[in-house]
Image: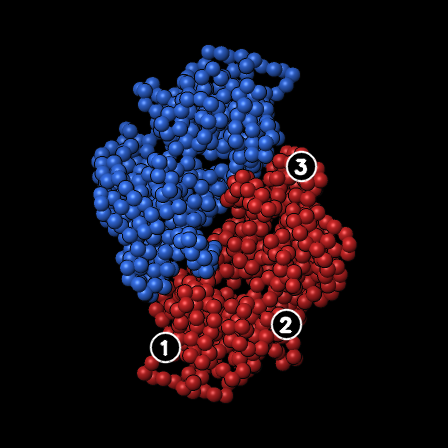
Chain colours: A red, B blue
Amino acid sequence: MATKTHERHKVIVVGAGFGGLDVVNNLSGKFVDVTIIDRRNHHLFQPLLYQVAGASLAPSEIAWPIRHLFRKRQEVNTLMAEVVGVDKKAKQVIIDSGERLSYDTLVLATGATHAYFGRDEWEPFAPGLKTLEDATKIRERILTSFEEAERTCDLVQQEALKTFVIIGGGPTGVELAGTIAELARDTLARDFRNMEPSKSRVVLIEAAPRLLSVFPEKLSEYTRKALEKLGVEVITGMPVTECSGEGVVYDGKQIKANTIVWAAGVKASPAAQWLGVEADRAGRVIVDQHLNITDHLDIFVIGDTAAATMEDGKLVPGIAPAAKQEGKYVAKLIMKRLKGKEDNPPFKYSHQGNLATIGHSLAVVDFGWIRLKGLFAWWIWKLVHIYFLIGTRNRLSVALSWVWNHSIGYRGSRIVMKTSSDRARKQHEDDK
Amino acid sequence: MATKTHERHKVIVVGAGFGGLDVVNNLSGKFVDVTIIDRRNHHLFQPLLYQVAGASLAPSEIAWPIRHLFRKRQEVNTLMAEVVGVDKKAKQVIIDSGERLSYDTLVLATGATHAYFGRDEWEPFAPGLKTLEDATKIRERILTSFEEAERTCDLVQQEALKTFVIIGGGPTGVELAGTIAELARDTLARDFRNMEPSKSRVVLIEAAPRLLSVFPEKLSEYTRKALEKLGVEVITGMPVTECSGEGVVYDGKQIKANTIVWAAGVKASPAAQWLGVEADRAGRVIVDQHLNITDHLDIFVIGDTAAATMEDGKLVPGIAPAAKQEGKYVAKLIMKRLKGKEDNPPFKYSHQGNLATIGHSLAVVDFGWIRLKGLFAWWIWKLVHIYFLIGTRNRLSVALSWVWNHSIGYRGSRIVMKTSSDRARKQHEDDK
């Protein structure tokens, strides 16, 4: 890959998540033309997605139009399209319309989606949380469950409507359980007349022996207790064995629930199939220490869709900071290789820590050299998240929403767009 | 309707728009139990809905959960349900589940919806703007039209994708045309590479001889010129004769357009059918001077779904202030009658004025005693709208959005939730 002086080097980046964005941010416009392709028009700040599901934040507060982010860089093209394949030989990306786009270097940063471990039929009953559409659907399901619980006179049905099961005790599951518990106990407490939202059941089920398995055991234990104080029932060491419109089954016991959310597992996007290369069990593309695929210096895979190995043999974790580091590394490497530098150092992941919040005033933080929990950890969590949002406007807007949420318990985004009959019709169709 | 001391008087209000809300706001809790029924969970500030369609505001900035608004009033019940009928004899409201709710007094404030004057088949091609769902759908169509225009190499198709037709030159049509023109010329100006959004065509077609027919002729003329300065083509005195996926036809001429918005006409909700009473041509229930229907002191109809006549024989206009005045009047009248007062003065509408904005820094205002146009009128328009929003949070949030929008041309809500393939699939299904 020598420098061509007569023609600019074409880089195609697929996926505008944390990884893809940081590739483009770190590519200088002098030598390259960049096309960033995403099937959506926006970059999404996924770490706060659960707050959209919990009606605390509006979708637009955590999303930015991709092409707006790069409006000042004439050499960057943004394309809203779905990639369906890669022709490695012709060096082309194939998009949904059948068109082919040529690249000199390709970076795949297409992320991950929910995995139901072979039980895909569970998806309609237990939607996962990866996109704004997912989040608004879950928000709608939670809010209308309360509305329907208020309407019904059937106490058994009301019980199911007021029961919320979250499957998976990682950060997303913990955060969702906390926010739903607080929604029921604080935000909605005075809003109903025929039923008490504060008597809702929020159940968090984790198959592994403890919550937040990437955290030290002490913080897992703290998290469990903090959630239980919020009124969440925490069940660990128990896989869910059945999932339906009726609720869930674990350990032979049934929990009747109208709302189930899946936060248990993810699988990589189909990048491995597009490339026709080896993938690990979770579908991630195996990459070398430069984040290239075997025999292809012109193809990089980064973020949640890549299986990159650290020096200690462990995998780079599937979190935003890792994707960002990989993005930056790949951009610099492309520039170095363009300048003819061949002997480049491998990617080195620097772990900055793990964070998770529990409800609206507690968190756990593990920086490795220091571990924090409680209110102080929660302040760190808030500051880190505000800091990583893009642009002053969204920072102000999210801060404003949080102030209202915390001081007077008002959640600014308690909207159900559909009418009650729309939902009834939908239910009827689902039943058929 | 004499006072019952032993039992509280049951008032059912159907519809939580401006009218319905002000009925509940003005009913004192001492004598009455109130149930407010709406098929949606939120009250919507419709005058700013066009800004959601234009990606300037987020849906939650102009919507409030109804039950949250009345959380402190124990005597107010909120029910998210769709009314399907009224049994006047049994004094019951019938909802979609088949349940019947008894009332002593019923207030119908169910608003209006789009009317296609017998051409209902136009609706899928030219959606109207009445709900948050409508607004987000129109926003999605506008934003993806630009995305698809950027993708296509077919110049004829690109032209159609960049053409936006608004049918109807009332305030909504004028405001929509202005906001779309500015979106194309300012907000998106630098964001694309393969096409120039500023060369979009925005066409406003009105069948009547002039825009804003409720305003004085001079302000209509001013509005036309101001819109033309923004780059809007204004066509008046020409009804649209055809409307399809291809575009519109008027006066034998075709305009190829991918996005058409209907702002031409409304019809009342089916309240007249529920009641089995006389309606006018637009489906509005004819009410007497106390806003009751004939022979039924226990049934009121207000707002856009009522045809109330003023002293001069003209109809009370279908605008928010009128609905609010009617709501307040009815609440007070119910209280008076409960106290045994029989000889009550008729409803008297006090017209405060008409307002409409043209783009982001001009407006026309007609207070009757004074008429204003331009920047000063626009400031009045802004202040009035901020004032009528509910709650400090939404006022701050909308003000923040406007500051960003005006100072740096950033529209905070440029989100398309669906992927490019979702849209392609949808298109494919529509074509079949």
Q: Secondary structure at mark 1?
A: loop
- Whichever of labels 3 and 1 marks the residue nearer the N terminus, that label is 1
Same chain for the residues at labels 2 and 3, yes or no? yes
Q: Of residues B411 and B269, which is closer to you in this image?
A: B269
What residue type is disc 3 on? Met
User: What is the quadrant of residue B81 in the picture?
Assistant: top right
Q: Of residues A121 and A62, which is closer to you in this image?
A: A121
Q: From where the camera sits, is residue B11 visible? A: no
- Nearer the camera: disc 2 or disc 3: 2
Q: Is residue A423 left or right of residue B179?
A: right
Q: Secondary structure at mark 2?
A: loop
Same chain for the residues at labels 3 and 1, yes or no? yes
Note whether A222 is above or below A302 in the view shown: above
The residue where tag 1 is placed is: A30
The residue where tag 3 is placed is: A195
- Whichever of labels 1 and 2 marks the residue nearer the N terminus, that label is 1
Q: Quadrant of the N terminus of chain B?
A: top right
Residue at 32% x, 51% y is B246
Residue at 55% x, 42% y is A425
Within-10-Å neighbours for mark 2: few <14, some 14–19, many 20+: few
What residue type is disc 2 on? Arg
The chain to which mark 3 is attached is A
Q: Measured from the top left, where is residue B47 in percent x and y?
A: 40, 39
Q: Measured from the top left, where is residue A125 in percent x and y?
A: 63, 52
Q: Measured from the top left, where is residue A254 in percent x and y?
A: 74, 50
Q: Gap between marks 3 and 1, in whole Å?
A: 64 Å
The residue where tag 2 is placed is: A281
Residue at 53% x, 58% y is A131
Q: Gap between marks 2 and 3, in whole Å?
A: 46 Å
- Nearer the camera: disc 1 or disc 2: 2
Q: Secondary structure at mark 3?
A: loop
- Whichever of labels 2 and 3 marks the residue nearer the N terminus, that label is 3
